[in-house]
Image (cartoon, coloured by chain):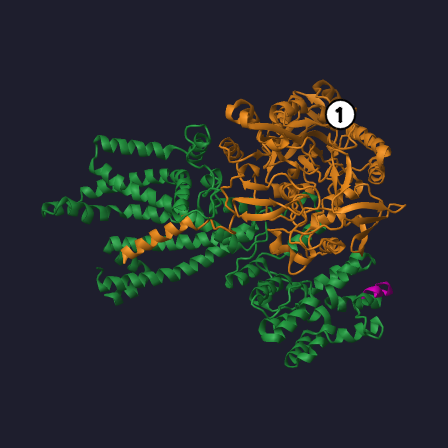
Chain colours: A green, B orange
Amino acid sequence: MIAKSRQRLLLRLLIRRLLLACVSLTGIGLLSFALIHLTPGEASLGADSELSAGQIAQRRRLYFLDLPVFYNSRPQGAEQRAARVLHLAHRETPEARRAVSACGTVCLPELFRAAQRDPAMRWALEQLKPTDVATSAEQWADRLVGRLSPAQISQSVERALLDPQRLAEIERLGSAALPALIDALLRAHGPVRVRISQLASRLSGFTQPLRGDAADRRRLANWRAWWFQHQRDYQRFPVDSPWLLRVSETRFGKWIARLIRWDFGFSLRDGRPVTEKIGQALPVTLLLAGLALIVAFGLGVPLGLVAAQREGRWADRLLSGGSLLLYALPTFWVAMLLVQLFGGLGLLDWLPISGLVSDDLAATASFWQRFLDRLLHLILPVFCMSYALLAAVLRYQRQAVLEVRSALYVRAARARGLSERRVVWGHLLRNALLPTITLFGLYLPYLVGGSVVVERIFNIPGMGLLTFESMLARDYPVLMGLILISAVVVVVGMLIADLLYALADPRVAAALDRQAFGAANRRGLR
Amino acid sequence: MTRICARFCLLSLLWLMTAGGCRQSSPQPDARVATESSVLRIGLPTEPAHLVYMLRPDAWTFRLTANQLLEGLVRYDPRQRRYVGVLAERWDWSKDFSELTLHLRRGVRWHDGKLFSAEDVRFTFDRLYDQRVDAASTRAAIAPIVADYRSVDAHTFLIRCKQRSSFFLQALASLMILPKHAMSQGDLNRHPLLRRPLGTGRYRFAEWLPGRQISLERNERYWGQRASIRRVVWRIVRTPQLALQLARRGELDFVPRLQPAQVETLTGDGTLRRAFARVERLVPGTAFVVINTRRPLLARSIVRRALAHSLDVERIVQQIMQGQAERVPSLYWPGDPDFDPAIKPPTYDPQLAARLFDQAGWKLSAGKRRHRDQPIELSLMVPSVSRSALRWATLFQQSLAEQGIALEIRSLEWSTFLKRLQARDFDLAALGMQIAGVSTDLYLQLHSSQASDGQNYAGYRDQRVDRLLEAIRQLSGQQRKQAVAKLQRLLVEEMPLIPLFTLREIGALSRRFVAPTAESDAWYDIGRFRLRSAVR
C-alpha cells in the first residue's frame, strides 16, 4: 500500500494539475475558436453557387455567422430587422406584406417615422393595426410608439403577471413585448406560464405553446433554444451599449453562452445538436480505439519483455524484425488490402468488412449472438488500428528493459538471491515501464480522436469520420465540440500519465510536486 | 482498488461491445426475414443531413425522397416527355398564363392516415416564403415567379404568377409538399420530422440508424399503384471501393455510381458480372469552363473561340472520364427537350486555334505568345474536390503551352473557389451546372442583369442573348425549340463559356431486380423497380 505521506503528495499533485487543466482548457478553447473562425473560407451552407448575396446573408444570420468573431463594436438588434423590413416596404408587394406582418410592432417606430415622411408607406401601418381598433392607423401607431420603451413594456408585463386578466392587454403591444414576455415565460409557473406561452406563440413565429402536461419541459427547452437564436430580432440594443454586450453579441460570446449550459449548439450541416452527434460517434470510437490500445499495449509490453530477455536469439530477431515490418506498413494500404481480401473473393469472406454490426441482425438476437457479431466486425478495424502501435510499444519496451537490465539495482537484487520472477516484476519491469507510460499518455487522445483512415475505409461512423466530415463542411459548432472534447481527454491523459509515473516511481512524484509547488511550498513540505 | 477499476473497465467495454454505438432505435420486425429478396439495398455515398429537400437541397436527399417518400404537385414523365400530376390531378392555366389553378387529388392520405388537402399545399408555400426557414435556394427557384397563392377550397389551390414562365412547372416539381398537421408546430429548421418525414409517397419512412442506414417501407395504402419492392434500405457506404466489395459479397443490390476504374471491374470480374448488370443514365446538367469576359485579354470572342479550339474535349471524355461522359455542343444537355443535335461542338484544331490567336494579335515570338509585348499568362481555377477537373486542366495546360500560352492551374478549396468566383477574380474557371429537372434555363448564367452580382460569372453582356433568354422563358413548343437553337448557335459563335460534357453515371444493379427502362427526371424511379421473378 502507498504510504500516507505519498498519498498526500499525490492528492496535492492532482489538485494542482486540475487547476492547471482548467486554465489550459480555456486557452485551448479560445485559440481553436480563433483559428477555426479566422481561417479564410467559410462554412458551405449547401449549394452556395446557386444563392444570391442576399440569400447567403439570410443563412449566415440564422447561424450567427454574420456576427464578428470576438468583438462587436456596434451590437445591432431589432433596428436592423426593422431596417430590412423598411427596405422592402417601399414597394407594396406580397413579400413586403408578409415581412411586415412577421415583424410586427417591433418595426413600428421605424415604420411610423417613415410613414410620416412618405405617405406611400402608410399601408404598412394599416397592415399592423389590429382590426378592432377604431382609430386611424396613424393615430394608433402614434399612441403605441410612446408605450414601446423597454421599461414601460416590462412594467406592463409585470402588472399582467400579477393579474392574469391583463395578459390580453399585452397582445396589443405586439411583438415588441416579446423580450419581456419570454423573460416572464422562463420565470413563471403553472397556468400563468401556459397562458404566457400561448400569447408569445401568437406574437412570434414560433408556435409551440406549453400545454401544462408532462411534455412541457421539452417545449420549454425548445422555447429557450428558439429565443437564443431569435432574440436579436426583437430586442433593441442601446447604441452606447454596455461593454458586456459588445462581447456577448459575437460568435465567441454566443458559443460560450451556450457552453455554460452544456449546450454545444447545433450542427450547421444538419441542424442536430452537437452533443447528440458526438454522443453517437463517441461510444463507437471509444470501443474501437480502446480495444486497439488494449491490444497494442497488452501484447506489446510482454512481447517487448520477451524480446529483451532473449536478446540476440531467434525469438528476439523474429519479434524485432516483425515489428519493424509492421511499423513500416501504411495503415490505409493494409486496410484497403484487407477490404479487397475479405470482399467476397470466395476464400475469405467470413469476416465482415463494413460497419460494426450486421444490418440484418435481428432485434431478438441473444446477448451472445450480438457479442459474436460485434466481435467479428471488430477484428479487421482493431487490427488495422493497433498493429503499428503494437510494433512501436514492443520496440520501446524492449529497449527500456535492455537499459534497466544492466542497472546496478537489478544486479543487486539478483545478488541478494531474489527469485527471477521478483527481479523481473518487482525491479526490472516497473522501472522499464516509464517510457511506455509516456507513450500511453500520448496515445490516449486516440480514444476520442479515432482514426479517419480506418473509420472511413471500414465505414464506421466514429469520431474520426465525424471530424473529417465536419472539417470538409466547415461545421464550426461540431468542430469546436470535437476539439474541446479532445482537449479534455489530452489533459486528462497527461494527468493519468503523471499519476501513473508517480505510482511507478516515487522519485517522480516528489520531483513533479517540487516543480509544481515552487520553492516556498517545498520548504513547507519538509 | 485497481482490481475493481480493471473489472469496471472490462464491464464497460463489454457493454460498449453489445450496446454502445449500435443502439437499436426501434424494434425491427424479424430482420433476417424469409422474404429477404424483396428488400432492395442501395449504396448511399454520403449521409444526408436530413430528408426534406426544401431545407437542404442536396442531390442525394432528392433521390432518396422525391416522389418516393414525399410527393410534389407535379413531376416530369420522361416517357411522355411532359409534366404529369402527382398530388395535383390536373391543372388549368388562365388565358394569359398568369394564374395556375391546381385541382388536387382527392382521397390522398398522409402516412399517418390523415387526409391531404389544399391546406397542406398552402402550409408548404407559407413555410417556403418564411424568411426564418432555411430554404433559400428552393425559395430562389419559386419566389421570383409567384406573385401570390391561396387555397380556394379543400381541393383547389391557386397560384398567381408575376409573369408567364415556361419553367414554372419544373420549379414546382422540385417542391415536395409537407404535412401541415404534423409540422406546423415548432421551428421548422430543426423539426424532428425532418429526419423521419411524413409524406404521401409510395414508401413510408421506417428507420434511420445514424451513420449506417436509412430504411423505407412500402406504403400499403398508397393512392396510386403500390411499389413492388417491400423494403428499400439505403446503406451509407462512404468509399466507392467498399461499395463494390459489399456488392460482391451480396450485401448491396444497387451501387448507383461507380468510379471509372470500377466499370472495368464490373465487366472483368466473373462474380460481379454474373450477379450484376450495368445501368446508366445521363446526369442532367453540363460541365464547362467559364471565361471571365471582363478581363481585357479575354473580351474578344475570337480569343475565346481560339481557346475552345485548343481544348481536346474528345480526349477528355475518352481518357479521363473513361466514357463516363458525353460531349455537348453548348450548355444544353442531350436529355433536354429543346436539345438540338444538329449543332456541333467546337473541334479540337490547334492550327485553327493558332490562326485565330494570330488574328487576335496574340503574336508568337520565341515560342511564347505576346500581346502588345506582354507575355500572355492565364490562370484556370479548379475546385479541389473534383479530381477529374484537375486532370483535364493539366491537359488544357499542355495544349496551351504548345500554343505558347502559359496557363497556371489553381486548385482551390470549394469555399475559396466560390468566393473568388463571386468576386470575379479569375481568368478561367472550371464549373458544373446541375439542373433540378430536365429543361435548361441559362438566364442566371448568361443574362446581362446577372453579370455584376448574379451567377453570370463570365460577366457576359449581349443584347441578342438577353432577348433570346427572355423569350425562352416565355415561349413553348416549336417556337421555343427554335429560339434555343438560335441561342446555341450564338453561344458557339461567342463562346463565353467553353462547353465540355454531360456526366454519364454508370451503376451496378443486381440481376435479381429489373429497373424501368426510362428513368425519372430526378433519378431512377425506385418505386418502379421490381424483382425479376415477379416479372416472369
Q: Position of residue A441 (x, y in %)?
A: 35, 49
Disc 1, SS: loop
Q: Position of residue B90 (x, y in %)?
A: 80, 45
Q: What residue lies at 61% left-to-right and 72% top-to-bottom? A: A185
In this rendering, would A417 be left or right of A125? left
Kindly identify which residue carries mark 1: B361
> Is residue B27 depicted above or below A393 in this figure?
below
The number of callouts visible is 1
Viewport quadrant of the C terminus of chain B: top right
Q: Position of residue A257 (x, y in %)?
A: 54, 63
Viewport quadrant of the N terminus of chain B: bottom left
Magenta span: predominant SS is helix
Chain of the residue where label 1 is placed in the rendered structure: B
- The image quadrant of residue A98 is bottom right
Note whether residue B312 is visible: no
Q: Position of residue A105 (x, y in %)?
A: 74, 68
Name the kind of residue labelled 1 in the image: Gly
Note whether residue A111 is visible: yes
> Is residue B77 depicted above or below B398 in this figure?
below
Of B281 and A25, the residue lying toward us: B281
Please give the range of residues in magenta: A118-124
- The image quadrant of residue A404 is top left
Of A288 and A246, the residue lying toward us: A288
> Is residue B131 depicted above or below B437 in this figure?
below
Residue placed farthest to the top in the image? B351
Q: What residue lies at 83% left-to-right and 71% top-to-bottom? A: A137
Is A345 inside the magenta-drawn segment?
no
- The image quadrant of residue B361 is top right
> Is residue B218 depicted above or below B157 in this figure?
above
